[in-house]
Image (cartoon, coloured by chain):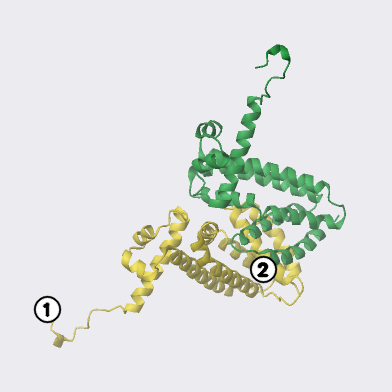
Chain colours: A yellow, B green
């Protein structure tokens, strides 16, 4: 064995803080995957820990309850998805085409796995008081953030009459379309419908 | 005991067919109530039979599986709700006010117990193949009927460009608003948003 005097660098050490962050990230990813695959009832803390390859002890250390785990998962991944949308939007052209592309990006988000995972929680929370208490503040925060993001991506001027409500309606419409896509592929109908909505929204938003 | 010759009418007999219909109606009502109160996971056939005051045997006779029971419940009550909406709409004034009232009636339906029960099933069916097989045809039928009803109540002319898509968008928007109302009372925001939506819809629908 080399002695210290041979100046071999010490084995690479991952700082504790960074390992914790990686463990949490794995748990949160696994939680959303479980929600998508098995729904709320199949998303137990045991199943998530196994899927993430994290010990039960470590899991309980980071997220002491099932409600804490799933709320953190949807909150964290929504923020990450919002950052991705901002990055994607940065490369979009300006001009009339931009609105179409922004609506398409948002529609993709509202039919993707994160929406499905969040919907599982929203519905389960209706009849589960502990989950409900954890989710209500998250729902309010996610709602505000999605609204702010949409205003920003569309470059909408909310001081003009009807603009704020139309941005909100766009998000509520996309949520409804997300639900309509749960059991069958609704993309053809959705595309036709959004084509009409994009034109109306463009008229409302134009200065 | 009076003899036949005293001409006392025979004890009132409820025909078998009518008793069966009453039993089914009680089971279907109890199913929706259970879905609203306990969600999909708490809506077992045993709980529903007890709530309806119907024997397990009679229940299994009418609805042999849990999927058959819940699908029949949502299908049947959606039809009944559609009839009620038609009846309510018959008393509405004609003129511009009518559109506002129709949208309000539909918004009430999409935030009521039947919507909540249906959403429980839609979400559960995503990860439950038996329920999914039962629900996909129902979802298609309910979607078509709600569209037809809305066109009828609004007196919309679908041959005009954009009208069909705008009627669809209204229903998808209302579905999204229904989901937004699951965990907290969203009525103030919904009212403001729908006020703007109604004005836009009126412009699109006007001949």
- Quadrant containing the N terminus of chain B is top right
Please rate how many residues cluster around mark 2, counting C-alpha atoms within 10 Å: few if below 14, some from 14 to 19, many from 20.
many
Q: Nearer the viewer, residue A200 or B192?
A: B192
Q: Is residue B95 left or right of residue A75?
A: right
Q: What is the x, y in percent for residue A108?
A: 57, 61
Dot 2: chain letter: A
SS of the residue at dot 2? Answer: helix
* Residue B196 to residue A4: above or below: above
Q: Which residue is mark 1?
A: A1
Which residue corresponds to the image point at 71% horizontal and 61% vertical from the top-left?
A: A197
SS of the residue at dot 1? Answer: loop
Image disc number at residue A99? 2
Can residue A54 be seen here? Answer: no
Q: What is the x, y in percent for residue B166?
A: 74, 56
Q: Quadrant of residue B204?
A: bottom right
Labels 2 and 1 positioned on one and the same chain: yes
Between the residue at mark 2 and the residue at mark 1, the CA separation in whole angstroms equals: 64 Å
Q: Is residue A102 left or right of residue B7?
A: left
Of all residues, the one furthest to the front in this rendering is: B1
Q: Nearer the viewer, residue B26 or A32?
A: B26
* Residue B119 to residue A148: above or below: above
Q: Quadrant of residue B77?
A: top right
* Residue A38 to residue B195: above or below: above
Q: What is the x, y in percent for residue A150?
A: 63, 71
Q: Is residue A72 left or right of residue B98?
A: left
Of all residues, the one furthest to the top in this rendering is: B5
Which of pointers 2 and 1 lies earlier in the amino acid sequence?
1
């Amino acid at each position: 064995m080399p002695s210290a005097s041979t100046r071999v660098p010490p084995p690479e050490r991952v700082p504790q803080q960074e390992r914790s962050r990686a463990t949490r990230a794995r748990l949160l990813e696994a939680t959303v995957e479980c929600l998508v695959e098995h729904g709320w009832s199949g998303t137990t803390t045991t199943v998530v820990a196994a899927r993430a390859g994290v010990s039960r002890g470590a899991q309980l250390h980071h997220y002491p309850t099932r409600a804490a785990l799933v709320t953190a998962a949807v909150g964290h991944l929504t923020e990450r998805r919002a950052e991705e949308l901002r990055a994607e939007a940065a490369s979009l052209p300006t001009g009339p085409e931009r609105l179409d592309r922004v609506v398409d990006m948002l529609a993709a988000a509202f039919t993707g796995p994160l929406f499905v995972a969040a919907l599982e929680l929203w519905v389960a929370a209706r009849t589960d008081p502990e989950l409900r208490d954890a989710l209500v503040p998250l729902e309010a925060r996610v709602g505000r953030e999605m609204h702010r993001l949409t205003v920003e991506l569309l470059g909408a001027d909310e001081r003009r009459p009807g603009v704020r409500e139309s941005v909100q309606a766009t998000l509520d419409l996309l949520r409804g379309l997300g639900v309509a896509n749960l059991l069958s592929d609704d993309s053809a109908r959705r595309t036709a419908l959004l084509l009409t909505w994009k034109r109306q929204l463009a008229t409302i938003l134009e200065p």
